[in-house]
Structures are given as C-alpha cells and as structure tokens.
Amino acid sequence: MTPLLEIKRVSRFFGGLAAVMDVSFNVNKGEIVGLIGPNGAGKTTLFNVINGFYKPSRGDILFKGQRISGLKPHRICRLGIARTFQVVKPLQRMTVLDNVVASAFLRSDSKREAVKKAEEILEFTGLSSEKDKISKGLPLGMRKRLEIARALATEPELLLLDESFAGLNPTELVQSIEVIKKIKERGITILIIEHHMKVIMSISDRVVVLNYGEKIAEGTPEEVSRDPLVIEAYLGEAPAA
Ligand SMILES: Nc1ncnc2c1ncn2[C@@H]1O[C@H](COP(=O)(O)OP(=O)(O)O)[C@@H](O)[C@H]1O
Ligand SMILES: [Mg+2]
C-alpha cells in the first residue's frame, strides 16, 4: 500500500545552515508517528516544508503518491494536510466558534454547514462550553485545543501537531491526550512533534528522531528509547517531564 506521506531525502538550508538534512521516512494511514529531537533539530522546519510554507532545498514530498513539494500551503491544506503551530495563533479577537467556522469554510458550501461542522468539532474537542468566548482570553490548554479544532475543521487526512502539549498543566495534558486518541479513532493520521517524552512514547506507533537536521533513528517507542544515538542526543538536555 502507498504510504500516506513520503518524505524523500528532504533538505532545507537557511544560508549555510542545514536545518533539515537528507531526511527520509514514511507515515502510513492510521498511524500516530512521533517526531522528536532536541531543540533546533529541525522538527518545525520539516513541518513548514511538508505544509508548503517553505520549499525543500532538495528532495521530494509525496502525499497519497502525489508530489506536493513546492505547492502553496492552501493547496496542500485542500489536499488534506492540516497543521497546528508551536506558538498558538488562532484569530485572537474572534470567538472560539467563529475561529473554527472560518476553518470549516474550506470544505463547506454555506455558512450553515460551516457552523454545523464547527459545533460538532467543538463538542468533539471538549470546547463547546467556551464557544462564545473571545479566543484571546482562554487558558493555554484551551487555546492549544482550539488550534487542534481549527485544524480538524479543514477535514484533514493527515494532521501535523507541533508541540500541542507544551506548557500544559497535568489536567490539560490528560484532556489533550484523550483528544489525540479520539482523533486517531476517527481514522485521521497524525504526525506529532512533542517534547514530553512520556506522552510521545505512550501515544506513538512509531517514532522518528532528528538531531542537527538529520534523522538519527526510527522505530517503535521501545526501540528508539534504547538507541544509543538517541540517548546521546538527549544528554545535556533537561529531560522534559
Ligand atoms: N526561517 C529561518 N531562517 C533561518 N534559520 C532558521 C529558520 N527557521 C529555522 N531556522 C533554524 O533551523 C534550525 C532548526 O529549527 P527548528 O526547525 O525550529 O527546530 P525544532 O523545531 O526542532 O526546535 C535552527 O537552528 C533554527 O534556528
Ligand atoms: Mg519547533
């Protein structure tokens, strides 16, 4: 079966810096794949290349067998890849509902349909009770979940989550993990960048590890956590949670 996403020898340079260097891996339909690595490893840059913010300097990206590298972000989103951002940026002055409605318009023919979809997604992500609040005033955990809700509203097949758990308190963390598991049950494939080792190891089917832009390991959470190269890459980093 064709993998859902194929990253083929992708590099991205910024001047002389190789932020991502010759990285290859696949994501299969229905999987949760964790993308980990120390700060500055190139994780967010790889997301930016996948969703079309940056063109790869080299290499190719295929989605459902179709080459998407070089396409604009809105084209890639329409094909079925949605993402969240490490720094949350929902439209701050809008209500929670309107934020999600704005995303739902991508695949809706009317405002009514968009609102209906948005309300269903707010229910799904546990944000219904907040729907009339202005996004700016929400606590971080809810803003991060709103980001996920906005991404879901575009009806993706592949969801890219960039540190959706960073900065959450233990209660918020549990709520967000539940949402991720439910998203998987819906049949949506997830590529997730995460710093919380325990979380990533418990929810990922497979893990890919980057260090200084290069892939240094790939395997099950158990395999990766035993890998000497991975252990070495994380030495000197404060273990996150
Ligand atoms: N737009 C950019 N211009 C120049 N350097 C960048 C840019 N984006 C990222 N980088 C650099 O690329 C490297 C990887 O960054 P990033 O992908 O954000 O890492 P991670 O998400 O793994 O922490 C870092 O050294 C960062 O400073
Ligand atoms: Mg990052």
Image (tube, rainbow, N blue to C red):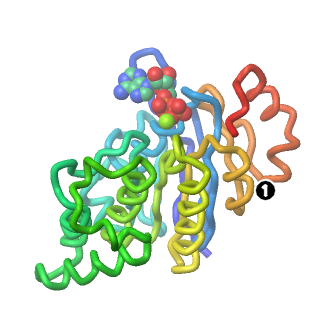
Q: Position of residue 35 (x, y in %)?
A: 61, 47
Q: In the current view of this chain or complex, which residue is farthest to the top? A: 16
The answer to whether the beta carbon of the residue marked 1 is less than 8 Å from any atom of ligand 1 is no
Residue at 27% x, 51% y: name it: 90
Q: Is residue 193 above or below residue 57?
A: below
Q: Is residue 39 above or below residue 174?
A: above
Q: Position of residue 69 (x, y in %)?
A: 38, 50
Q: In the rendered image, which quarter contains the C terminus? A: top right
Q: Nearer the viewer, residue 60 or 97?
A: 97
Q: Nearer the viewer, residue 107 or 99?
A: 99
- Tell whether 237 sits left or right of 227: left
Q: Position of residue 41 (x, y in %)?
A: 58, 30
Residue at 28% x, 52% y: name it: 73
- Tell whether 227 sits left or right of 140: right
Q: Is residue 137 visible?
A: yes
**Residue that label 1 marks:** 220
> Mark 1 Cα within 10 Å, few/some/many (few <14, many 20+)?
some
Q: In the rendered image, which quarter contains the N terminus? A: bottom right
Q: Quadrant of residue 76?
A: bottom left
Q: Is residue 20 visible?
A: no
Amino acid type indicated by mark 1: Thr
